[in-house]
């Protein structure tokens, strides 16, 4: 096992879905995978492997925020040979064009996190981006399933309760669709390990209108996102 994942080598598939919520990982595994096996309960950050359309797929919770997610992503890449990582998360809309339950694919991820400032000595504003082939596949899959998935830039924030919400307005003025808390670290680490990554998100709350979905819905109702993530992972 790695420091934070209680799996033996070979128990995790090269294709991994990554919800922040470990109970969303359980729901996806039990709802969509054939013969799901739970390979890790360390810290209750559940991970499962099963088959989707006959292809081995894992679903690993990552927790909230980049410090947590980066631990799981790095261990999956460095110690378990993951090659395709698809985040399936919730997000807050900052664009007026989005509504609750809309599905978003993140083409790139701005961030207020210091993680990439550390990585690049504060000298480069690195641009974390999605894998193009995965994104193209996800767009195709969404179209085939009649889902009007929005593709665009998002922002990955360290604080959920942001001390500078005015920055979200400025980001929205620059085309940013939504905020979540993990994608910039995911895209950066995938690039570093020459793996493929994509973040697919469902709008669980709207920062401008104040509307939001209950936690049970965030855990167990994102069928469109789960389907697009799984179909994309196995193609
Ligand atoms: O629903 P998940 O995947 O956890 O994603 C979003 O929800 C959490 C905040 O409520 C953060 O992790 C954010 O990125
Ligand atoms: O990071 C997140 C996730 C969901 N909703 C938000 O407002 N922010």
Image (tube, rainbow, N blue to C red):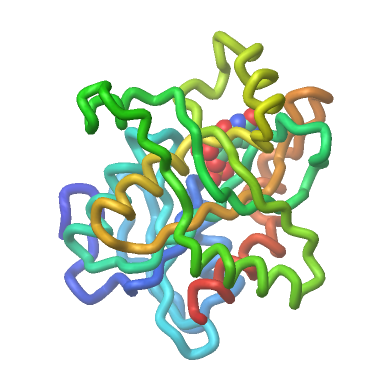
Using residue 2 as the reference point, say whether residue 66 is left or right of it: right
Q: Give the residue furthest to the front.
A: 123
Q: Residue at x 30, y 29 (%)?
A: 124
Q: Is residue 94 left or right of residue 4?
A: right
Q: Quadrant of ligand 2?
A: top right
> Is 95 situated above or below 208?
below
The residue shown at (45%, 23%) is: 112
Residue 48 image point, x, y percent: 40, 67
When the figure is inspected, residue 229 is found, relative to residue 175, above or below; the finding is: below
Judged from this view, the residue extending furthest toward the bottom is: 54
**Front-lying residue, 58 or 194:** 194
Residue 191 horizontal/vertical position (percent): 31, 53
Instruction: Report which quarter residue 98 is drawn in.
Output: top right
* Total number of numbered discs in the rendering: 0
What residue lies at 18% left-to-right and 58% top-to-bottom? 78
Is residue 205 rendered to the left or right of residue 9? right
Which is nearer the eye, 149 or 45? Answer: 149
Residue 187 placement (x, y as % from top left):
40, 48
Q: Is residue 6 left or right of residue 173?
A: left
The residue drawn where x is 65% and y is 60% is: 225
Q: Where is residue 110 shown, x and y percent of the image?
A: 49, 33
Q: Quadrant of the N terminus?
A: bottom left
Near-viewer residue (47 or 143): 143
């Amino acid at each position: 096992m790695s420091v934070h994942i209680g799996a033996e080598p070979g128990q995790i598939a090269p294709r991994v879905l990554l919800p922040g919520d470990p109970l969303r990982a359980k729901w996806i595994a039990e709802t969509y995978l054939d013969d799901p096996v739970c390979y890790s309960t360390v810290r209750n950050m559940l991970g499962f492997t099963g088959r989707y359309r006959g292809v081995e797929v894992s679903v690993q919770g990552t927790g909230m925020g980049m410090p947590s997610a980066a631990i799981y992503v790095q261990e999956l890449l460095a110690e378990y040979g993951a090659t395709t990582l698809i985040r399936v998360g919730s997000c807050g809309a900052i664009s007026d064009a989005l509504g609750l339950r809309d599905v978003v694919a993140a083409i790139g991820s701005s961030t207020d996190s210091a993680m990439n400032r550390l990585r690049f000595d504060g000298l480069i504003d690195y641009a974390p981006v999605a894998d193009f082939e995965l994104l193209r596949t996800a767009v195709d899959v969404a179209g085939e399933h009649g889902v009007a998935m929005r593709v665009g830039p998002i922002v990955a924030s360290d604080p959920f309760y942001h001390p500078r919400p005015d920055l979200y307005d400025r980001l929205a003025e620059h085309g940013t669709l939504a905020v979540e808390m993990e994608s910039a670290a995911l895209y950066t680490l995938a690039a570093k390990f020459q793996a493929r990554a994509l973040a697919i998100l469902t709008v669980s709350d709207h920062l401008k209108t104040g509307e939001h979905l209950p936690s049970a819905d965030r855990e167990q109702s994102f069928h469109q996102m789960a389907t697009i993530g799984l179909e994309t992972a196995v193609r």
